[in-house]
Image (cartoon, rainbow, N blue to C red):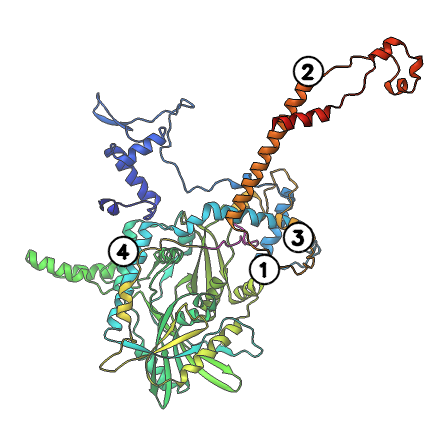
């Protein structure tokens, strides 16, 4: 009965489009009786591939038989439907733009000039800028409606993109993740930690006096090999998606490579400079500075304190691997791996890769080699020895001295960091930091950079002064680079200030409030732990060396034995607004200003709901006099009251029916006066003298008959 659990559902294990087409072509051609294929053929009879390949009896060749669309009578040549193609959603907007096409084009030119940091010096440029600001005020209401429409559409149709990932990419991320978790088993085996104390962990806040964190000099100790990236090939590729062969080679490269051992270089620097108090990894420092993400996540950072030269030196290592990873983070790591797969190590000299078109000296040297006959086994052994080349190191490490100034006190930091890659231009190296921004709403534009992404981007750029940041905006569905920007430190700082009003100097001040407490801890191995129970504090776990560990001690090997490699079943993501200043290829092709309605649709008058609600005056609350609370009536009393009301209505209907019957009988059998022959009314006839009346009239005149008394008497008799 559990056979269905072994099935692979496409919803949970998403594959790439190319791999799906291969699977579908095999399934439809060889497994026509499969229940899934039969269901697809029933729902889509036009694009069915069940009997597509027909064998020609004359030539015994396979002929492709295209189906015929019954609506048009033509052959269907496109058998696959591209489900990842962007839809033309701009025709579904509730209204058109308030600006004309010429206004959109003018705003795009000025916005592009602003993004490129070009000045507006001439009179014509100043006039264009003033017109741009006037048009921006005109579309304020339109942009508010645009955000409302995009948010509703994202929550209804596009939110599933954030919880989906290609199966091949997910397998790559999980495989590398498992390898890093395996190193934790070896590094922290037979080690137990116990809670020592808790220190404060501050969220972002403004400070009157901030600390200064600056590099001592531009000198950097470099060792290892930095990979080269050819930006032209990266940016001009149709998609970042690589085939399985390249992904397997990338995984083998990552699996064989080990972190750089820079302990000798670090000890040398510590002996030369006796003022160094912290040796910290740049990745860990970037994460600790990012108060937005580390306040909402569970993490652990190991550190150790050693006594060197009569002073305590704190070594803060890399952050440990997470216990679970949401789908968005997996997608981020996968696309970073895809970008890194385009990097390569430039090999200056390879003795086993000799050029066939050698010069004269090389040809003479080759001709002077003596050849001799050897056995086949010996030949294979020599080939195997030559093929076992020493692998070029694909890791690098850099060391740089920094100083932290707090009032009159000064502390030295030794930062170890790694360069992502470099780009060569005219034999000059430019170091580059790769920043990946995934886009889930490419139909409407580029998403805004979140606070966490900007802080992480700024911290990486700040700790690598001799580099630039390459921000790649990648479509998360099609893996296509939609835009790229080279950023400097001031660009990121201005964006942080404009978008979220964050001063980067406050980030170092907040972190320093916690780090300076660690100077008072004794030498030994420790762990800085943060959980979701108490977000405002971090726990400091110390190594437990007692022979009989207690149950309250923590073993990292036991904790990492329950790593959740599967994706979470339920995930929730917030909507990210569209950036108003980023121009994508879609905006250029349609001459469309970001975050505005299309100019080719007629304008309709639309009032947002929020404006309608605020326009109404708030209701005034009248003072309610003190009243005693009404007693709650029981259900039995309500039922009895309804029964009494029903009986009373029944009696009234019965009485009304009886009166109506009696009235009909009286009208039928009571004496009838007949019509009066006198034209005068009866009131006037009563005033006449009866002596003057004729005998006939006197005979016709009778006393009035009381009908009501007759009805009452009949009711008494009936009772």
Relative placement, left or right, of 556 versus 219 is left
Q: Earlier in the sequence, mark 3 or mark 1?
A: 1
- SS state under label 2: helix
The mark lying in front, picked from 1 and 4, is 4
Inter-mark Cα distance, 4 to 3: 60 Å
Q: Are marks 4 and 3 in contact (CB under 8 Å)?
A: no
Q: Earlier in the sequence, mark 2 or mark 1?
A: 1
Q: Earlier in the sequence, mark 4 or mark 3?
A: 4
Q: Earlier in the sequence, mark 2 or mark 3?
A: 3
Mark 2 Cα-neighbour bin, 10 Å: few <14, some 14–19, many ≥20: few
Mark 1 Cα-neighbour bin, 10 Å: few <14, some 14–19, many ≥20: few
Inter-mark Cα distance, 2 to 3: 74 Å
Residue indicated by mark 1: 117
Mark 4 Cα-neighbour bin, 10 Å: few <14, some 14–19, many ≥20: few
| Residue drawn where x is 89% and y is 17% of the image | 685
Q: Who is closer to the viewer here, 217 or 540?
A: 540
Residue indicated by mark 2: 669
580 magenta-colored: yes
- Image: 180 above or below 218: above
Q: Is residue 373 something one can see in this rendering?
A: no
Residue indicated by mark 4: 249
Mark 3 Cα-neighbour bin, 10 Å: few <14, some 14–19, many ≥20: few
């Amino acid at each position: 009965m559990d056979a269905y659990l072994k099935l692979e559902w496409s919803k949970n294990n998403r594959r790439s489009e190319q791999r799906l087409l291969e699977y579908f072509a095999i399934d439809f051609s060889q497994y026509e009786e499969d229940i899934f294929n039969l269901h697809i053929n029933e729902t889509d009879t036009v694009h069915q591939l069940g009997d597509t390949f027909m064998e020609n009896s004359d030539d015994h060749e396979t002929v492709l038989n295209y189906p015929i669309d019954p609506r048009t009578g033509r052959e269907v040549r496109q058998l696959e439907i591209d489900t990842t193609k962007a839809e033309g959603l701009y025709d579904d907007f509730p209204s058109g733009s308030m600006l004309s096409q010429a206004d959109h084009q003018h705003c795009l030119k000025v916005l592009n000039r602003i993004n490129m940091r070009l000045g507006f010096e001439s009179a014509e440029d100043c006039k264009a800028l003033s017109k741009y600001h006037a048009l921006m005020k005109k579309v304020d209401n339109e942009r508010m409606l645009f955000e409302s429409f995009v948010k509703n559409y994202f929550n209804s149709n596009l939110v599933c993109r954030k919880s989906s990932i290609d199966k091949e990419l997910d397998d790559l991320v999980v495989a590398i993740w498992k390898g890093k978790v395996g190193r934790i088993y070896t590094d922290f085996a037979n080690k137990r930690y116990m809670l020592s104390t808790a220190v404060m962990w501050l969220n972002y806040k403004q400070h009157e006096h901030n600390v200064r964190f600056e590099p001592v000099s531009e000198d950097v100790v470099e060792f290892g090999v930095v990979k080269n990236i050819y930006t032209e090939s990266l940016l001009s590729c149709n998609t970042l998606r690589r085939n399985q062969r390249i992904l397997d080679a990338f995984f083998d490269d990552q699996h064989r490579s080990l972190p750089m051992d820079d302990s000798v270089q670090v000890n040398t620097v510590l002996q030369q400079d006796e003022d160094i108090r912290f040796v910290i990894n740049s990745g860990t420092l970037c994460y600790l500075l990012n108060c937005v993400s580390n306040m909402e996540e569970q993490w652990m950072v190991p550190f150790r304190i050693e006594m060197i030269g009569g002073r305590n030196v704190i070594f803060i290592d890399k952050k440990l691997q997470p216990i679970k990873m949401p789908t968005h983070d997996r997608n981020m790591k996968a696309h970073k791996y895809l970008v890194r797969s385009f990097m390569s190590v430039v090999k200056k000299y390879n003795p086993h890769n000799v050029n066939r078109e050698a010069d004269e000296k090389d040809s003479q040297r080759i001709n002077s080699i003596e050849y001799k006959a050897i056995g086949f086994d010996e030949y294979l052994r020599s080939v195997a020895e030559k093929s076992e080349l020493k692998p070029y190191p694909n890791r690098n490490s850099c060391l740089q001295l920094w100083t932290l100034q707090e009032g009159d006190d000064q502390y030295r930091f030794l930062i170890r960091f790694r360069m992502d890659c470099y780009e060569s231009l005219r034999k000059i190296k430019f170091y580059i930091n790769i920043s990946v921004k995934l886009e889930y709403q490419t139909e409407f534009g580029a998403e805004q950079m979140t606070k966490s992404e900007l802080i992480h981007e700024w911290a990486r750029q700040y700790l690598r002064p001799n580099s630039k940041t390459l921000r790649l905006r990648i479509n998360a569905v099609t893996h296509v680079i939609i835009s790229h920007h080279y950023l400097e430190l001031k660009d990121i700082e201005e964006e942080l200030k404009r978008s979220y009003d964050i001063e980067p100097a406050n980030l170092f001040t907040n972190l320093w409030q916690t780090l300076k407490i660690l100077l008072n801890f004794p030498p030994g191995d420790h762990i800085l732990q943060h959980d979701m129970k108490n977000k405002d504090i971090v726990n400091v776990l110390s190594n437990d060396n007692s022979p009989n560990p207690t149950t309250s001690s923590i073993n990292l090997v036991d904790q990492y034995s329950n790593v959740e490699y599967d994706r979470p079943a339920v995930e929730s993501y917030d909507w990210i607004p569209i950036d108003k200043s980023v121009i994508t290829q879609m905006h250029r092709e349609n001459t469309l200003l970001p975050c505005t309605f299309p100019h080719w649709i007629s304008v309709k008058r639309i009032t947002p709901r929020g404006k309608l609600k605020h326009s109404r005056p708030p209701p005034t609350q009248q003072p309610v006099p003190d009243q005693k609370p009404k007693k709650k009536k029981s259900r039995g009393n309500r039922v009895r009251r309804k029964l009494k009301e029903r009986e009373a209505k029944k009696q009234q209907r019965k009485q009304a029916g009886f009166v109506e019957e009696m009235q009909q009988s009286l009208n039928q059998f009571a004496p009838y006066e007949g019509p009066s022959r006198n034209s005068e009314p009866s009131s006037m006839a009563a005033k006449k003298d009866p002596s003057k009346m004729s005998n006939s009239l006197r005979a016709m005149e009778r006393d009035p008959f009381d009908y009501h008394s007759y009805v009452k008497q009949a009711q008494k008799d009936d009772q």
